[in-house]
Image (tube, grey):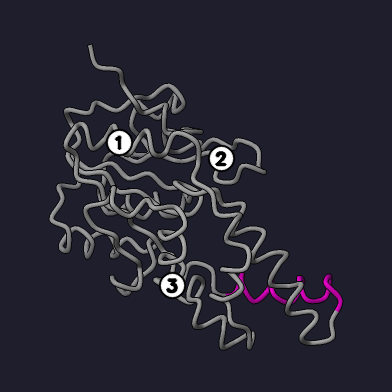
Amino acid sequence: MGSQDKNKKPSHWRPGWDEIDTILLDMDGTLLDKHFDDYFWEHYVPEIFAKKNDLTRREARKELLARYRSTEGTLAWTDLDYWSEKLDLDIPALKLKIDHLIQVHPYVIDFLQYCRSLNKKIHLVTNAHSKTLDIKMRKTQLGPYFDRIICSQDIGLPKEEPTFWGRLESMLGFDKNRTMLADDNENVLQAANIYGMKILIFVARPSSRAEVLRSEKFPSIVYFNELIVERL
């Protein structure tokens, strides 16, 4: 999709809903405000880790950020059991302590209701660990909007791998030419692009605390109301 003409003005692109049967949506940063995850991993966990290991917050943060980066793009990156073991912390319990920070992005529910009104298939497709997914679905109550919810651990690969999308297509039975994927990670969109998925949307403000940063490769939105086309 990266070379298509529609990408020359990504912020002005609008979907042709009659050309879309299935919608694949990422969770963190796409539907949910990534501020929770950024704060949890970059500040809250380092604070707890520092106290437990007699480190300064700065020392703990530097060590943990390096550890996180070493697993980025792998299943371990989002595996709560992996991090609980490696850090000797109960990561799911710590997430629950600050779950008040879990927030749905503006217009997400409006968009999901709109897609339902068009009788589209809607699937949540996330790299998040199943325990993270459970916490966030309980908090947000978004679960009933989806026909299926798929974690990358169900596939056995992270979404950054092009092979992931072939396995997902076999599991869900969608037509990649009539499926829209929205994600806040360009590497994920690029993997889907390599696989041959045609309708790819970049979410340009994953965190409410971050500035808008549009993609140069894919059509970009800030909020999902940009994809709602009023019917005559």
Cα distance, mark 1 to mark 2? 21 Å
The residue singled out by tag 1 in the image is: 113
The residue singled out by tag 3 in the image is: 131
Q: Is residue 140 above or below residue 132?
A: above
Q: Quadrant of residue 54?
A: bottom right
Marks counted in the figure total 3
Name which of mark 1 and mark 2 comes first in the sequence. 1
Q: Of 41 and 9, which appears nearest the observer?
A: 41
Name which of mark 3 and mark 1 comes first in the sequence. 1
At a point 44% along the width and 34% down the height, the residue shown is: 107
Name which residue type carries label 1. Answer: Gln
Q: Of 96 and 152, which appears nearest the observer?
A: 96
Whether residue 195 appears in magenta in the rendering, the answer is no
At a point 49% along the width and 49% down the height, the residue shown is: 32
Name which residue type carries label 2. Answer: Arg
Q: Quadrant of residue 137?
A: bottom left
**Span colored in magenta:** 56-70
Q: Position of residue 141 (x, y in %)?
A: 39, 53
Magenta stretch, overall SS? helix
Q: Of 55 and 187, which appears nearest the observer?
A: 55
Tell me, yes or no, whether the two marked residues, 3 and 1, touch with CB atoms within 8 Å.
no
Name which residue type carries label 3. Answer: Lys
Q: Secondary structure at mark 1?
A: helix
Cα distance, mark 2 to mark 3? 25 Å
> Which mark is nearer the camera, 2 or 3?
3
Query: Which numbered dot is residue 205?
Result: 2
**Mark 1 crowdedness (10 Å alpha carbons): few <14, some 14-19, many ≥20:** few
Left or right: residue 213 compared with residue 19: right
